[in-house]
């Protein structure tokens, strides 16, 4: 994909910059359960207004003090939070680094702020917002309550809401043995989001006039 005018993306989503986020957690409750992994995948737009995956940033995260971790969640993800080679960092450090990346992307691409993209996005947004509050991070670059949910979008576009099945319908390779890693799921979700947006454009759906 040849990138000529990287600022087109600032005109596509009402000034918002989509950033794909995935978290792997110790449970379902954002305020009490640990974030164990977090990842963000950035996007770029070419001169024809087509989106593509740009880069993924991921972090292994140390459970915050007093965090709840359900064994069923660990069985599902296969994560060992206390593995000596995990190279996990404190939640605040991971979140600050991720937010710094997002802020830089917003500035570089001349957008007004970021908007979170996720598969069942309310889940990821809930954990990110709870962690930002827990760490007293005031400058959260993401819109506080709006997001793009690829589970909903892929239900409309492909008749599937499960990430692996939606990817299959979209022709995106998906390795179930690699799933439930934040980096892997963020990248597949990003590919899915790009495919939906690009198919909409190519089918004659609305896009801004970049002329």
Image (cartoon, rainbow, N blue to C red):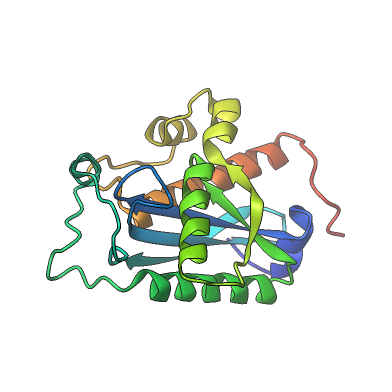
Q: Quadrant of residue 67?
A: bottom left
Q: Residue at x 46, y 32 (%)?
A: 166
183 sits left or right of 211 in the view = left
For the point 38% across and 65% down, the residue is: 58
Percent position of residue 37, x then y: 33, 59
Q: Is residue 190 left or right of residue 39?
A: right
Number of marks: 0
Observer-nearest residue: 6 or 165?
Answer: 165
Tell me, yes or no, if residue 55 can be seen here.
no
Residue at the far top in the pictured view: 159
Q: Which residue occupies 41% across, 73% down?
A: 92
* View extreme (left): residue: 84
Give the x, y percent position of residue 142: 62, 61
- Residue 156 at x, y = what percent? 60, 27
129 is higher (above) or lower (below) than 93: above
Between 47 and 76, the one lying in front of the other is 76
Q: Is residue 8 visible?
A: yes
Front residue of this view, candidates 183 and 70: 70
From what the image shows, is residue 113 above or below residue 68? below
Quick check: 198 left or right of 160?
right
| Residue at the image point whose x is 53% and y is 43% from the top | 122
The quadrant of the picture occupied by the C terminus is bottom right
The residue nearer to you, when weighing 13 against 27, is 27
Residue 80 coordinates in the image, percent (x, y): 16, 56
Q: Quadrant of the N terminus?
A: bottom right
């Amino acid at each position: 994909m040849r990138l000529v005018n990287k600022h087109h993306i600032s005109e596509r989503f009402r000034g918002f910059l989509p950033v794909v986020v995935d978290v792997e957690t110790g449970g379902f409750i954002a305020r009490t359960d640990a974030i164990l992994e977090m990842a963000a995948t950035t996007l770029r737009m070419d001169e024809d207004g087509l989106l593509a995956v740009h880069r993924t940033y991921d972090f292994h995260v140390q459970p915050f003090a007093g965090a709840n971790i359900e064994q069923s969640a660990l069985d599902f993800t296969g994560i060992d939070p206390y593995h000596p080679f995990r190279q996990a960092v404190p939640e605040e450090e991971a979140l600050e680094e991720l937010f710094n990346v997002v802020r830089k992307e917003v500035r570089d691409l001349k957008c007004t702020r970021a908007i979170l993209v996720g598969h069942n996005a309310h889940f990821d947004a809930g954990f990110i917002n709870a962690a930002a509050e827990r760490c007293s991070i005031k400058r959260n670059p993401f819109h506080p309550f709006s997001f793009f949910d690829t589970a909903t979008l892929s239900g409309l576009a492909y008749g599937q809401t499960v990430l692996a099945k939606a990817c299959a319908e979209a022709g995106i390779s998906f390795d179930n043995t690699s799933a439930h890693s934040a980096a892997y799921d963020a990248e597949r979700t990003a590919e899915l989001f790009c495919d939906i947006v690009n198919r909409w454009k190519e089918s004659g759906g609305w896009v801004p006039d970049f002329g």
